[in-house]
Amino acid sequence: MNVKRVFGAALTILGVFGLIYTGYQLINKSTAYTTLIVVGIIGLIFFFSGINLVKNTKDES
């Protein structure tokens, strides 16, 4: 079990949840735009860093 891959998958899942939350709140016309911008940016960072961790980690058995 590779710890980097597990951590990358966890980051990716957290990023997806952050992006879904941001999209849901934008559709419901939430007025807290500053919070949504912060959550959206953090979600993007988590998502792309998780994808890169999973993609760039070599399998060593």
Image (spheres, rainbow, N blue to C red):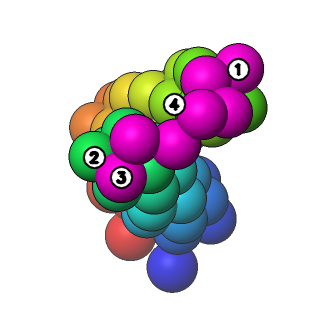
Graded by Cα atoms within 10 Å as few (under 14), some (14 to 19) or many (20 or more), the crowding at tag 2 reads few
Q: Which residues are magenta?
A: 28-34
Mark-to-mark CA distance, 4 and 3? 15 Å
- Residue 57 lies in quadrant: top left
Magenta region includes residue 29: yes
Q: Secondary structure at mark 3?
A: loop
Circle 4 sits on which residue? 40
Type of amino acid at the residue the image marks with label 3: Asn
Mark-to-mark CA distance, 1 and 2? 15 Å
Circle 2 sits on which residue? 27
Type of amino acid at the residue the image marks with label 1: Thr
Graded by Cα atoms within 10 Å as few (under 14), some (14 to 19) or many (20 or more), the crowding at tag 1 reads few
Tell how many labels.
4
Type of amino acid at the residue the image marks with label 4: Gly
Graded by Cα atoms within 10 Å as few (under 14), some (14 to 19) or many (20 or more), the crowding at tag 3 reads few
Circle 1 sits on which residue? 34
- Tell me if residue 36 comes above or below residue 9 in the rendering: above
